[in-house]
Image (cartoon, rainbow, N blue to C red):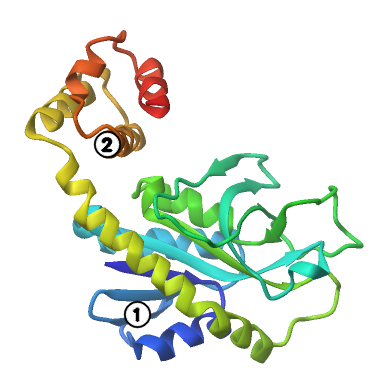
Amino acid sequence: MIIFHTALFVEAKPLIEHFKLTKDITNSSHQIFSKDDIFLIISGVGKVKAATAIGSILTKQKANIENLILINFGIAGSNSENEIEKLFLINKITDFASQKSFYSDQIVKSTISEKEIITFDKPVSKTNLQISIDKQIVDMESSAVWESARVFLSSSQIAIFKVISDSLESKKVNGDYVTKLIKKNISTIINYAKNLEKLLLDTYPKCLTNEDIIEIEKLIKELKLSHSEKLKLIELSKAFKVKNKDLSLKSLLNQIPINSKSLFSILQIQ
């Protein structure tokens, strides 16, 4: 299952047309479109609306959570005019208000250029920027999308794409222009999403042996891991097994002291 998220209808329009999605008229809180195992939710602009929408749709799909991926896409601003109309895959997100940073875990081989993004609470322009932006781009939803999704999903189940629509000038971006930008890049985004879904379905469920699963469940109980820590352990264990097919997870864990900090550190560097 793939869940797509956008802030605006003009961003979502090319996806709706591509898959011929139909609107769920029974949902009054958000605009939701779907067809088969493809879902789209439109939240509106801003962190609160984005977090609410993501939390709502993932709660409803809790039974399918292990076989689900979330793809956010939309427009963003850049300090460089040379980046206008370019598509970027986000590899680091920083929330300006909280100064928290989050790092994506992209397991799909891709030629898409990667970029860092800073999420602001309000629209920003070159005249009201409170910090110096060099390599980063800016938006108003990414950090909220990430934090809300991570309550339910591992980082490898989430991807964020941004198309640069402006160079942080104060003038308003036209809706038709936004749709044109997304339409130009929608096939690339969809192909990435399908490749990620296939990789998670075909590779990850098969990489853990029964012995690995027993060891993971044992650690969850012994360390009294929280829900987010449990997701992190499963995610890191799967990544370890994909990279080290012939090694036993149990044999690795027997070599280290049993505490969550050392456990996560060892798995991350293997």
Q: Position of residue 131 (x, y in %)?
A: 84, 47
Q: Measured along the vertical axis of the image, is residue 25 above or below residue 45?
A: below
The residue sitting at 18% across, 41% down in the picture is 207
Instruction: Judge by depth and name the residue closer to the eye, 77 or 30.
Output: 77
Q: Position of residue 48 (x, y in %)?
A: 56, 60
Q: Amino acid at mark 1?
A: Asn
Q: CA distance from mark 1 to mark 2?
A: 33 Å
Label 1: element kind: loop
Q: Position of residue 190 (x, y in %)?
A: 41, 73
The residue sitting at 41% across, 46% down in the picture is 155
Q: Quadrant of the C terminus?
A: top left
Of labels 1 and 2, earlier in sequence is 1
Instruction: Judge by depth and name the residue closer to the eye, 104 or 144.
Output: 104
Q: Measured along the vertical axis of the image, is residue 98 above or below residue 84?
A: above
Q: Measured along the vertical axis of the image, is residue 66 above or below residue 240?
A: below
The answer to whether marks 1 and 2 mark residues whose Cβ atoms lie closer than 8 Å is no
Q: Measured along the vertical axis of the image, is residue 245 above or below residue 104?
A: above
Left or right: residue 207 versus residue 78 is left
Q: Amino acid at mark 2?
A: Ile
Label 2: element kind: helix
Q: Position of residue 242 (x, y in %)?
A: 27, 40
Q: Which mark is residue 234?
A: 2
Instruction: Judge by depth and name the residue closer to the eye, 7 or 161.
Output: 161
Which residue does the numbered mark 1 point to in the structure image? 27
Outermost residue, left direction? 210
| Pair 1/2: label in front | 2
Left or right: residue 33 versus residue 103 is left
